[in-house]
Image (spheres, grey):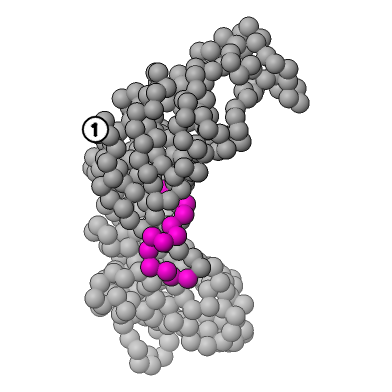
Amino acid sequence: VYMIPCPKSPHGCDVDPSGEYIVGSGKLAALIPVFSFDKIQKAIAAKDFEGNYEGIPVIKYESALHGEVQKPGLGPLHTEFDGRGNAYTSMFVSSEIVKWSIKDLKVLDRAPTYYSVGHLMIPGGDSKKPNGKYLVAYNKITKDRYLPTGPELSQSAQLYDISGDKMQMILDYPTIGEPHYAQAAPADVVKGRSLKFFKLEENHHPRVAKGESEAKVVREGNKVHVYMTAIRSHLTPDNIEGIRMGDEVYFHVTNIEQDWDVPHGFAIKGALNAELLIMPGETTTLKWVPDRVGMFPMYCTDFCSALHQEMSGYVRVSPAGSNVPLSFHTGKTGPQNGAAKPAAAAADSANK
Ligand SMILES: [Cu+2]
């Protein structure tokens, strides 16, 4: 490890696409130092140090320096690159984006931001192959920009077209927070590589129910495992009795949909941990420890169709030591003729 001095209070440290130039942005500085990786290597080999800081050698500033961008503005924070030899630095204090040439360190253009830009982003702008067509400025201060909504104001961002010599603002919009190191990529990087759903036949979850006929409720001591399926628009089973105080209930919910964009959710009233969000073909487990006797609604928590609210059911919790047998069924709301045996109930569900 080595250190290099950098004026003043360095904030962002950004490497250009070639890997040779390292931009140090001192947030209180009125210039931007650009260091050279080659020069740093040579300085280390030649032990070109100016002392050490707690045992770490400090490389001489001049020995590591490629050069300084003079009068870029005030308060440089972060730098992104367009892949055409240009760098774009956010200037917090003077509230602008400054475009400069990496090779000769000349300022080429400047565009105001509204106000006080922090991070900025060019798609792939900190990679080896930037897609240098657009730049987004993420601003920290928005006073007077939008309707006054109280002490907290919306943040703002600006989209610039940087394909020409001059930056051109093409969109100005409110955003959330000031996204830090946001990334963007051309759509075709993602398109075609996106999974639409998990194949049910490839689901090897030990508690999967691949169809409603496999749905069941199994007691193992004080642990009750519910093998549940979710499909538009019901849960199977949606009626469970015989859970007792002192039980730990595990809902293993399989979303048996095999279609794109049909996640189901699962929650039960009184669960202290998160609800589930289950992708098509996936099995996910929610642990629930009932804290009182009574009826507890359970329901899908992700809007899945116009009949979304039909995806609900009830669990009855009996007192500890109760002799209410474990039973489950689907789609029946009235009292049953005696307690259905689990196997019979499963067959019953399958026939529906
Ligand atoms: Cu649903």
Image quarter hosting the N terminus: top right
Element under disc 1: loop
Mark 1 Cβ and ligand 1 under 8 Å apart = no
- Pinpoint residue 59: horizontal percent, then vertical percent: 64, 17
- Pinpoint residue 342: horizontal percent, then vertical percent: 41, 77
Does residue 188 sit above or below 55 in this rendering? below
Q: Which residues are magenta?
A: 138-150
Residue 82 visible in the current orientation: yes
Spot the residue most to the top. Answer: 46
Residue 144: say if magenta: yes
> Of helix, strand and loop, which mostly describes the magenta segment?
loop
Nearest to the observer: residue 100 or residue 226: 100
159 left or right of 240 in image:
left
Does residue 127 sit above or below 235 in this rendering? above
Which residue is at 42% across, 22% downward? 105
Label 1 CA crowd tier, 10 Å (few <14, some 14–19, many 20+): few
Residue 62: say if magenta: no
Which residue is at 61% across, 8% downward? 45
Which residue is at 32% across, 63% downward? 263
- Quarter of image, res 267: bottom left
106 left or right of 261 in image:
right
Spot the residue most to the right. Answer: 54
Q: Which residue is mark 1?
A: 164
Nearest to the observer: residue 64 or residue 185: 64
Which residue is at 56% across, 81% downward? 244
The count of marks equals 1
- Quarter of image, res 125: top left
- Pinpoint residue 82: horizontal percent, then vertical percent: 33, 30
Nearest to the observer: residue 158 or residue 182: 158
Residue 34 visible in the current orientation: no
- Pinpoint residue 352: horizontal percent, then vertical percent: 25, 78
